């Protein structure tokens, strides 16, 4: 069996760059393996969210009226702003990949930082939207009143799933004289909607946090001059993951906010 001497290994590394791992023969082969691995991972992520989407379809069919009433209590304007934020972040990621391909370090760093700022903006807005729901459960009209302890009032709604869940009667058709059984079914439908809402958007937020970690790692690598026009695979792979996060939100926004 032929063996590779130290000198031959040194020449091999020098001719292709230090980024070429020993198990690959060419940079192209290494890039293809990394891309295939990422696509395989993205498929598993789609399967993960696919389970939530399937549950959504089943319960949306079972409780159509409750679904419409519950969706009306979400903060659609904030969600619309978040949708724009993520769409812009997809653009900055694409521009980052283009900058890496051209070897433009300054533009690459700028686009990566902008992408992370947009990601943080998304999480801040989503956090405020969550805090609205918890503030109402605590008897406060908004998150600021909840934090400061001022302007508290008797709670008339609690949209966080659990024992304290209370859907406001003025928004529910269940109080229209259909009996206790119908009321209970409608309340179950409302709570199922918000359970799926928190599960889906919460899981998406976790992926956004991971995406920020990925972008932070890539930014650090860019600062250390790890990329060149011949090697920028991590930027492309990280961009694919970020685009998945954006695409999932494009589905979540109409399903929960625009029903």
Image: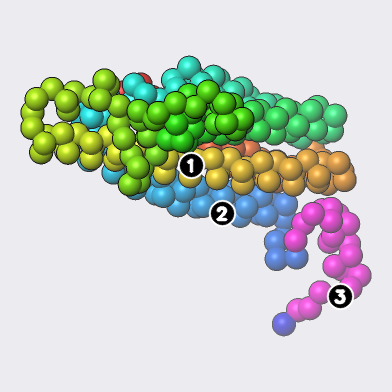
Residue lying farthest to the bottom in this orientation: 1
Percent of width and height locating residue 116:
69, 34
Marks 2 and 3, how far apart in space? 30 Å
Q: Are marks 2 and 3 in contact (CB under 8 Å)?
A: no
Residue at 79 percent of width and 78 percent of height: 3
Q: Secondary structure at mark 3?
A: loop
Percent of width and height locating residue 70:
31, 28
Q: Secondary structure at mark 1?
A: helix
Along the viewing direction, whichever of 144 and 227 lies nearer the viewer? 144
Q: Earlier in the sequence, mark 2 or mark 3?
A: 3
Marks 1 and 3, how far apart in space? 52 Å
Along the viewing direction, whichever of 171 and 124 lies nearer the viewer? 171
Q: Earlier in the sequence, mark 1 or mark 3?
A: 3
Q: Are marks 1 and 3 in contact (CB under 8 Å)?
A: no
Q: Quadrant of the N terminus?
A: bottom right
Q: Quadrant of residue 222?
A: top right
Magenta range is 2-21
Percent of width and height locating residue 153:
44, 26
> What residue is shown with label 2?
37
Residue at 84 percent of width and 56 percent of height: 18
> What residue is shown with label 3?
5
Q: Earlier in the sequence, mark 1 or mark 2?
A: 2
Determine if the magenta segment contains residue 258: no
């Amino acid at each position: 069996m032929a063996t590779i001497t130290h000198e031959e290994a040194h020449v091999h590394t020098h001719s292709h760059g230090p980024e070429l791992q020993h198990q690959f023969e060419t940079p192209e082969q290494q890039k293809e393996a990394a891309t295939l691995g990422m696509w395989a991972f993205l498929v598993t992520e789609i399967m993960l969210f696919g389970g939530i989407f399937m549950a959504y379809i089943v319960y949306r069919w079972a409780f159509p009226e409750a679904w419409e009433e519950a969706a009306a209590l979400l903060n659609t304007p904030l969600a619309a702003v978040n949708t724009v934020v993520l769409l812009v972040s997809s653009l900055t990621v694409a521009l980052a990949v283009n900058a890496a391909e051209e070897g433009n370090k300054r533009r690459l760093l700028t686009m990566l930082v902008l992408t992370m700022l947009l990601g943080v903006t998304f999480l801040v807005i989503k956090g405020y939207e969550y805090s609205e729901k918890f503030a109402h459960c605590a008897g406060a009209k908004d998150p600021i009143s909840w934090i400061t302890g001022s302007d508290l009032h008797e709670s008339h709604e609690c949209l966080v799933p659990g024992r304290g869940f209370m859907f406001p009667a003025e928004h529910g058709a269940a109080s229209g004289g259909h009996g206790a059984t119908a009321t209970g079914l409608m309340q179950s439908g409302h709570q199922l909607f918000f359970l799926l809402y928190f599960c889906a958007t919460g899981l998406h937020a976790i992926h956004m946090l991971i995406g920020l970690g990925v972008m932070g790692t890539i930014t650090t690598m860019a600062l250390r001059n790890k990329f060149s026009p011949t090697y920028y695979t991590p930027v492309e792979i990280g961009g694919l993951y970020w685009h998945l996060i954006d695409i999932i939100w494009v589905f979540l926004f109409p399903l929960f906010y625009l029903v």
